[in-house]
Amino acid sequence: MIMEALLVGVILFIASCLRYLLMVGAYYGVVYVFFKEQLHKFKINKEFPEYNMIKQEIYWGLVNNINFFLLGVALYFLYQNGMLKIYTDINEYGWFYAIAIIPVLLVLHDAYFFWSHYLMHRPWFRKYSHHHIHHMFHNVSPWAAFSVHPVEGFIEVLVRPIILMLIPLHPYTIAVFAIITFTLNIIGHSGYEFFPKNYATSEFTKIKSCATFHYQHHKNGNYNFGLFLNVWDRLMGTLHPDYEKDFEESSKHNPIEIPMNTKSGLHSLSNLFKTFRW
């Protein structure tokens, strides 16, 4: 049983390393290499990170994956002892549940991340969590998405087995959730702002985070502790006071706008439907 658990851990470790290298590498290649000149206007900090810093980001991003080995071993034993609520028959809860539970997981994960991240910035916890490693990178690249000390990475990944012990989830849901969270983390640490120029003020999106949101945190660690959302930052008064202004500046080259409120959104949809009338 121990050998099987170790094998699961090794497989999850290799898979997480490949996911990191392939997904981040693809995003980095498109934005920082192949379309570097065309997309430069969307870069928040117009300077590019130094090569040595990028190497450090990749190093810590790969070292941090040791936690997925530990996660694999832990999940194996938890599953063998019937402590996980993973189910394999999609009809047991239905497709609607399998899809609808994803935003719930995102909200729960974001709340856990906010409070653990907030505590990591307290002097008594910062030292032991080694959170300073992540803040070595001020002008972040996508490689910084998972560039943390393994101790911090362990704290962050701890929420996943807890969720799996409390909430029934299908492997499809787990896979989609993992892809979404990883992608959002890459975008948030990309150093580029591609979201619509009124993203930070529209009622549809103003509670969500973005690359500018995370960039501000790396510039000033006293603000913006959320991951996918900024709800907790708004409630706790830790949202950067210049968030909307800085976002407006970093997104000024984006011609796309989203509705500012429900009424204007419905009006826009109405006009769209009228366009396709016979």
Image: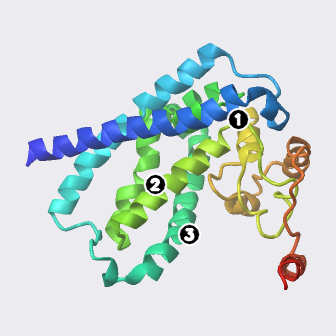
**Residue 161 occupies which quadrant of the picture?**
bottom left
Coordinates of residue 193 in the picture (x, y in percent): 77, 43
- 274 vs 33: above or below: below
Q: Amino acid at mark 1?
A: His
First along the sequence among labels 2 and 1: 2
* Residue at the bottom extreme of this rendering: 278
Left/right placement of residue 130 relative to residue 140 reads left
Mark 1 crowd level (few <14, some 14–19, many ≥20, 10 Å Cα): many
- Which residue bears the numbered disc 3? 103
Mark 2 crowd level (few <14, some 14–19, many ≥20, 10 Å Cα): few
- Which residue bears the numbered disc 2? 178
First along the sequence among labels 3 and 2: 3
Residue 40 appearing in the image: yes
Coordinates of residue 263 in the picture (x, y in percent): 89, 81
Depth check, mark 2 against mark 1: the one in front is 2
Left/right placement of residue 99 relative to residue 132 reads left
Residue 131 appearing in the image: no
Mark 3 crowd level (few <14, some 14–19, many ≥20, 10 Å Cα): few
